[in-house]
Amino acid sequence: MRRTGWVVAALAVLAGAAGWWQSGARWRGELYCFAQPGQVWEVGAVPAGAAPGCPDSRSVRAEVRAGQTRVEQFTFPDWQPGAVLDVLKAGGSRN
């Protein structure tokens, strides 16, 4: 019976550590700045050919994590200045 208690305690510690690690996983990932990967500001799908990305800046990462700013970046293989704007307008953005 004592052995079972130690096993349960060890599993609880491992589960807690795993939960703690996973809670910060978003901020360590490449696309940390997206609230919902695959979406443009949560209003529509990322346009075809767009490559989403986030700044490689520790300070920007900290600001996004603290909720002080929000950044979503997209690069395209060719000049498409309206592609992301079209998604935002279709999602109800007025500007």
Image (spheres, grey):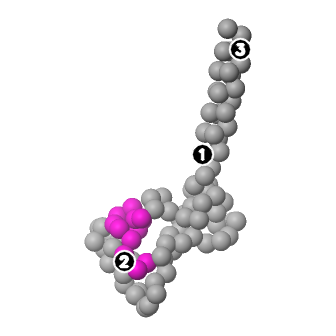
Q: Which residue is label 1 attached to?
A: 23
- Residue at figure coordinates x 29%, y 67% from the top left: 92
- Residue at figure coordinates x 66%, y 15% from the top left: 4
Q: Which residue is label 2 attached to?
A: 48
Q: Position of residue 67 (x, y in %)?
A: 57, 56
Image quarter hosting the N terminus: top right
Q: Which mark is residue 73?
A: none
Mark 2 Cα-neighbour bin, 10 Å: few <14, some 14–19, many ≥20: few
- Residue at figure coordinates x 61%, y 39% from the top left: 19
Dot placed on the residue nearer the N-terminal end, 2 or 3: 3
Q: Which residue is label 3 attached to?
A: 3
Dot placed on the residue nearer the N-terminal end, 1 or 2: 1
Residue 5, above or below 75? above
What amino acid type should be assigned to the residue bearing mark 1?
Ser
Magenta-colored span: 38-50
What amino acid type should be assigned to the residue bearing mark 2?
Ala
Circle 3: element type? helix
